[in-house]
Amino acid sequence: MVVRTVDLRSDTVTRPTEAMRNAMANAEVDDDVLGYDPTAQRLEAEMARITGKEAGLFVPSGTMGNLISVLTHCQIRGSEIILGDYSHIHIYENGGISTLGGVHPRTVKNNEDGTMDLDLIEAAIRDPSFEICYPTTRLICLENSQAHSGGRCLSAEYTDKVGELAKKYGLKLHIDGARIFNASVALGVPVHRLVQAADSVSVCLSKGLGAPVGSVIVGSKSFIARAKILRKTLGGGMRQIGVLCAAAFTALQENLVKLEGDHRKAKILAAELNKIKGLKVDVATVETNIVYCDILKGSRISEAELVKTLEQYGLLILPEGPLRVRFVLHHQISESDVHYAVSCIQRALAGVAEENGDK
């Protein structure tokens, strides 16, 4: 019988705090589709201020935020965007830019640190003199932090260089900033500096910050005006969304300061996992709240089997590919939970060794 649950599947699994629930219950609201919800306006203005942009727009999800941003920049079907082959937009968002927007993705290899080589980005930009054959490059997309690289952070200097490249060719730059606050805390650089070169950013509030719902797109006033129309087209125009925005605003106030602790606990977890026989973690690459752990072949257990076994102890994690699992820390995971997770994994692997007669 499971007496304790430690959920490390994602930082999206957090529950609303009591302060968030109170804020939702007492939120001042109006019809946001008509443009009158005061709590939504307050949140959007605050996010624009934090990111150094002119305006913001609340959307139901990060996937919709990225989709709206791409389609707003690429209003002509047959446009092409350059993005990482391990980026969230390319892998985990149902191909929405293509199926709904007619936008073609051109991928560039993501390095282990989440970056893409500048020369490869430049080489991927289409020659406009061959537009009769090629789609037209209109946008470059970055992701910070880069989830599939283990929460690695892109520096402001790197992003600036990509921004300069975009301007050189008359392109726009969008940043999927689902965990941009994690990157900001880890690098010790304000969010507005990290996204200074970007024309638009999608910032998720329901990951590390722990809000129950929502993301905010930021950009110029003209960009947000066009994005708001697309939000309605895609079914994202909602009415009294101040109820949701109130929780998100509270998350900004009470959970932003907890991200550093999440990163510290992730590093503790990584170091302890790396001590367990049969597992390997590149501890030096753990920069934020995501830990990737490789299962060595001699362990005689697959990632799916390990995940299933750990469920029996109340430890929830996700498989991340052949012989690899993922752990994600958030503010509702304590240091005690981290040590419990390590003990569960030790027991699980010890049980496998015993079954196989290993000493």
Image: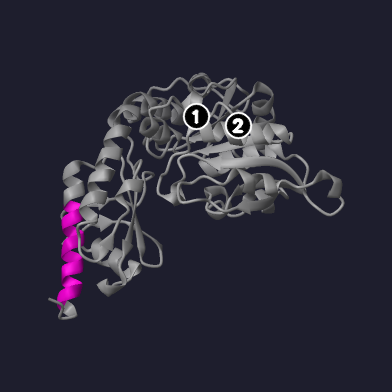
Please identify the quadrant where the C terminus is shown.
Answer: bottom left
Is residue 354 in view?
A: yes
* Residue farthest bottom in this picture: 357
Answer above or below: position of 48 versus 227. Answer: above
The three-letter amino acid code for the residue at tag 2 is: Ser
- As drawn, the label of residue 291 is none
Left or right of residue 136: residue 306: left
Residue drawn 58% across the image and 20% down it: 36
Q: Earlier in the sequence, mark 1 or mark 2?
A: 1
> How far from the left and from the top, in percent, is residue 196?
55, 26
Left or right of residue 292: residue 148: right
State the separation of the CA atoms marked 1 and 2: 12 Å
Disc 2 secondary structure class: strand
Is residue 237 in view?
A: no
> How far from the left and from the top, in percent, is residue 213?
44, 37
Which residue is label 1 attached to?
Answer: 194
Foreground mark, 1 or 2, reads 1
* Residue farthest left in this picture: 359
Which residue is label 2 attached to?
Answer: 200
The three-letter amino acid code for the residue at tag 1 is: Leu
Answer above or below: position of 108 versus 276. Answer: above
Q: Which residues are magenta?
A: 340-354
